Amino acid sequence: MTITTLLVANRGEIACRIFRTCRDLGITTVAVYSDADADALHVREADLAVRLPGAAPADTYLRGDLVVAAARAAGADAVHPGYGFLSENAAFAAAVQDAGLVWVGPPVKAIELMASKTRAKELMAGAGVPLLAPVDPATAGPDDLPLLLKAASGGGGRGMRIVRELDALGGELLAAAAEAASAFGDGEVFAEPYVERGRHVEVQVMADAYDTVWALGTRDCSLQRRHQKVVEEAPAPGLDDALRTRLHDAAVAAARAVGYRGAGTVEFLVSAEGRPYFLEMNTRLQVEHPVTEAVFGVDLVALQLRVAEGEPLDAVVPAASGHAVEARLYAEDPARDWQPQTGALLTLEVPDAPGLRLDTGYTGGDTIGVHYDPMLAKVIAHAPTRTAAIRLLAGALERARIHGPVTNRALLVRSLRHPDFVAGRLDTGFYDRHLPALTAPGDGDPATAALAAALAEAVAATTHGTSPAHSAPTPSRFGAWRNVPSQPQVKRYRGEPDGTEHEITYRTPRTGVPEPYEAGSGTRVVSVTPTRVTLELDGVTRHFDLAYDRDRDRVHVDTAGASYTFTALPRFTDPTTRTDPGSLLAPMPGTVVRLAEGLAPGAVVEAGQPLIWLEAMKMEHRILAPASGTLTALHAAPGHQVEVGALLAVVQERAAGAPAPEETV
């Protein structure tokens, strides 16, 4: 059957990426969207779109019945699930086919067999795929530590915990099960040995209905935060030929064992000694598939469509060429426990150059909401060598203009340039060891960037009489003369997100060109417009590009090798200055999913004790007691949606030396 109209049962970046291939093939595209995504990029790019009423995933993208009805309403003849949501839901795949639609994915039976990691491991053992021996949590002892708890269903790091002390096992089992049940509707959790300094290496497979199975090389996905991938590359560096062959053979055996068709990924944990262990098989397209596409010169989505239409794959696997690296750009703050960020994305511009690729579900002017994953985009670089690919990607990220919520862009650049990454010394503990150094203040010059912001805003105010955000000035050189030099002016900024304050003193002489007030500073103003400032600093000329977010009194400054965001002061104050000591504030917008058992005003709590669980962007975040004492107020309840800075509870600290009451939660 030839596919003419394809509905993508997904959103954001992956929907846009699939639509791109469909346009190349002449296939009509259909989007589905929640109310929160009514103006999203994937809706704007689709030929047709169908609304799924509601905002939460459970009411929209996870409603298979509504998605099938949308496909029928739009006249689609095929459904592609993308990744996440219903992509590995066997019942949804069956419903699509029962509706007479083509399912662009693996057979229902293959999804069922691999849906549970525990059942998948039993099947892989029979196929001769190397495995880690499971551990029964009920009988685990000190010799079994450390343990890794994992959700039997789903992925993306939800329901996953590392346990290093037996006393913590019971509580972590409950927490993992609760998170798994919330994310996947299945609270089953299993345990296996945690391999210290292991590498996450996977093999891309592609199979057709004629017994052809391709193993399209390896990918290393070891750089992870919260068990979710951040940087991926192909091929995985530092593997000898024997290990690569073993991984390829095991991946093909896994695919054949379940009668696989289409694109899939077999994931392995490779120990420091070079021993591979099967982790799971993802019966879908992976987020990191572009690095494989770049190295092998293929379009995996086009191949998925080809297999779904019943066409065979070529007998010969395409040849690999060069190296590719991908970085996931997230709206999150790595220095603050990876807290997801929301708000208006004013600018998202990544340099366009040979070897670079941008996959995104956002453009400048879009809004990042609270309901979905915080990934903004994937930036991919392909070059003849690993060194060249890393340099290309780091440079592109560094020169990108990203204005709005805090992102992990600086972390990505530093990660790519870290000596361990450059040398290929990779393992899943990379961020556990290096995060403090990777998020420490850099060697940039925020004070000079703040100076540029003050000069630009001064020009905007004097030459246009309005804020730069609401004007479209024509860049010009100096020439507006004044009769009387102005008095010194002071502008104060707070750097984001570190909170450092900068006080800038400048004056505007008869030339009309603002300049630093302090003489002999080593800074000479070359030119100033509201959107670009050029300064000569100790003989070196530097350019500063500016963009404004007047709704939040922010200015964004981009210069070579660094970007800065400043908030004008004193118009905003920190919400913590308006609250009582011991107040627990929401660190991000989200939904309260549960409270500690028995938590109520009057309860006694201990410092560091988890009190409130907040869900934001598909992840659970624990709100901890700031001190030992008594809960005097509780404003949170399960199901409540809260904004950043919202007061959740108040803990009155117990005086030093005072005995703890007996009633605790």
Image (cartoon, rainbow, N blue to C red):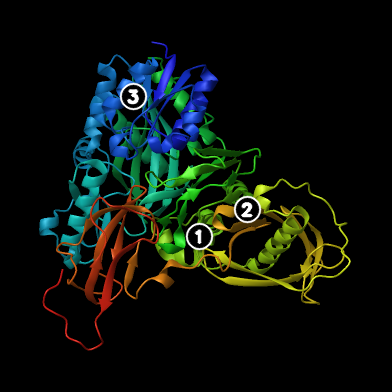
Disc 1 from disc 3: Cα separation: 37 Å
Q: Earlier in the sequence, mark 1 or mark 3?
A: 3
* Label 1 element class: helix
Residue type at numbered disc 1: Asp
**Residue occupying the point 42% across, 11% down:** 2
Label 1–label 3 contact, CB within 8 A:
no
* Label 3 element class: loop
Mark 3 or mark 2, whichever is nearer to me: 2
Relative horizontal placement of residue 314, taking residue 274 as reference (left or right): right
Disc 3 from disc 2: Cα separation: 50 Å
Tell me, yes or no, if residue 318 can be seen here: no
Pick the front one: 419 or 566: 566
Q: Earlier in the sequence, mark 1 or mark 2?
A: 1
Relative horizontal placement of residue 212, taking residue 611 as reference (left or right): right
Label 3–label 2 contact, CB within 8 A:
no
Disc 1 from disc 2: Cα separation: 37 Å
* Label 2 element class: strand
Residue 389: x and y in percent read 59, 46
**Residue occupying the point 23% across, 56% down:** 637
Residue 437: x and y in percent read 50, 67
Asked which quadrant contains residue 260, the reply is top left
**Residue occupying the point 23% across, 27% down:** 91
Q: Residue 261 — which label?
A: 3
Mark 1 or mark 2, whichever is nearer to me: 2
Residue 274 higher or lower than 113, as above or below: below
Relative horizontal placement of residue 223, taking residue 268 as reference (left or right): right
Where, quadrant-wise, is the N terminus in this rendering? top left
**Residue occupying the point 73% across, 63% down:** 455
Residue type at numbered disc 3: Arg
Where, quadrant-wise, is the C terminus in this rendering? bottom left
Q: Residue 420 — which label?
A: 1
Q: Which residue is mark 2?
A: 548
